[in-house]
Amino acid sequence: MTTTTNSTVLITGANKGLGYETARRLARLGATVWLGARDPRRGAEAVAKIHADLPDADVRTLTLDVTADESVRAAYTRVADSGTGLDVLVNNAGIAGSVTPPAETVPAAFLPVFGVNLLGPVRVTQTFLPLLQESAAPRLVMVSSGLGSFAMTADPERVESTVVDLVYPSSKAALNMVTTMYAKALPDIRVTAVDPGYTATGLNGFSGPQTVAEGSDAIVEACTAAEPAGGFISRHGPIPW
C-alpha cells in the first residue's frame, strides 16, 4: 500500500514513459521530485506538463546523462546545493537496443545497452550515495525487467520466455545482481529491484498491454510503501530472481 510522502526523489530518464508517470504520481502524493532528463529541453517540457496538471507540485528538472561522469557529477552538485536532500533514488533510464538473433549478435552490440542499463545505475548510485546516506529513511530503486529473471525467462508459461535476445535481458540480469550486492553492502538503505511488466512505452514501440499507470505501480510502491518489500517486485508482489 502506498502512502503520501514528503520525501525527495530523483528519477533518471523521467521525461517520458515510466519515469515521467512515476514523477507525476509521486508529485501528486506530495514528494519533491527531481526529474532527470538527458535533454534539458525535454526535461523542462515534462516538468511544465506536470505543473499544468499539478500547479503546486514541487517538480524540478535536472539535466542528467547517466552515461557521462561530468553530467552526473554536475547533477549531484545541483541537488546537493539546493538543500532538498535526497531520500529516494530511482534508476529508471534504460534503452532496449536492437534485437538480433543470438548467433548474429556481435560484442559491440552490448556496449551502448550495458552503458545505460547497467553502468548508468552504478554511476548515478555511486555519485549520489553520500547524499542518499544523509536521509533518515533512504531508498534505492532499480527499474529492472522480468527479462532479467532467470526463473521467469525459463518458464514456458511466462511471456518473458518467448524473448530470445542476448543483449537487453543480460543487461537487466546484471542489474539484478548489482541490486543484490548493493542490498548486502548498504544495509541501512532499502534496496529494491522492480519489474514494471510489459508496458506500452517507446522502449517496445508501445506494444505492451499494460498502461504506464499500471507499469509504474511497482516503482511507486517501492518509493512510498510504509514497509517497502525490498528484493525483486512487480505490481503483483515479489517475483523470482
Image (cartoon, helix red, strand yellow):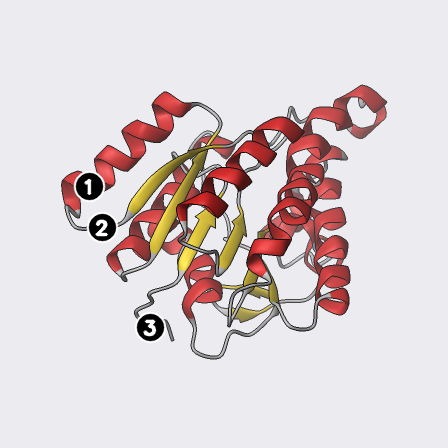
**Is 36 placed left or right of 58 in the picture?**
right
Q: Which residue is mark 1?
A: 51
Horizontal and vertical percent position of residue 124 = 62, 43
Secondary structure found at label 3: loop
Give how far across and how far down residue 212 sits, in percent. Answer: 37, 47
Q: Quadrant of the C terminus?
A: bottom right
Q: Is residue 154 positioned above or below 70 on the image?
A: below
Residue found at x 55% / y 74%: 229
Q: Residues within 10 Å of mark 1 (few under 14, many from 20)?
A: some
Q: Which residue type does callout 2 highlight?
A: Ala
Q: Are marks 2 and 1 in contact (CB under 8 Å)?
A: yes
Is 29 on the left-hand or right-hand side of 199? left
Query: What's under tag 1, amino acid-wise?
Result: His
Q: Earlier in the sequence, mark 2 or mark 1?
A: 1
Q: What numbered label is drawn on residue 57?
A: 2
**Extreme residue in the bottom direction:** 227
Residue 150 or residue 78, whichever sits in front:
78
Q: Give 187 or 91, whichever is nearer the viewer.
A: 187
User: Which residue is found at the position 30% from the left and 48% from the top?
Assistant: 24
Res. 19 in view: yes
Q: Residues within 10 Å of mark 2 (few under 14, many from 20)?
A: many
Is any atom of residue 100 visible in this view?
no
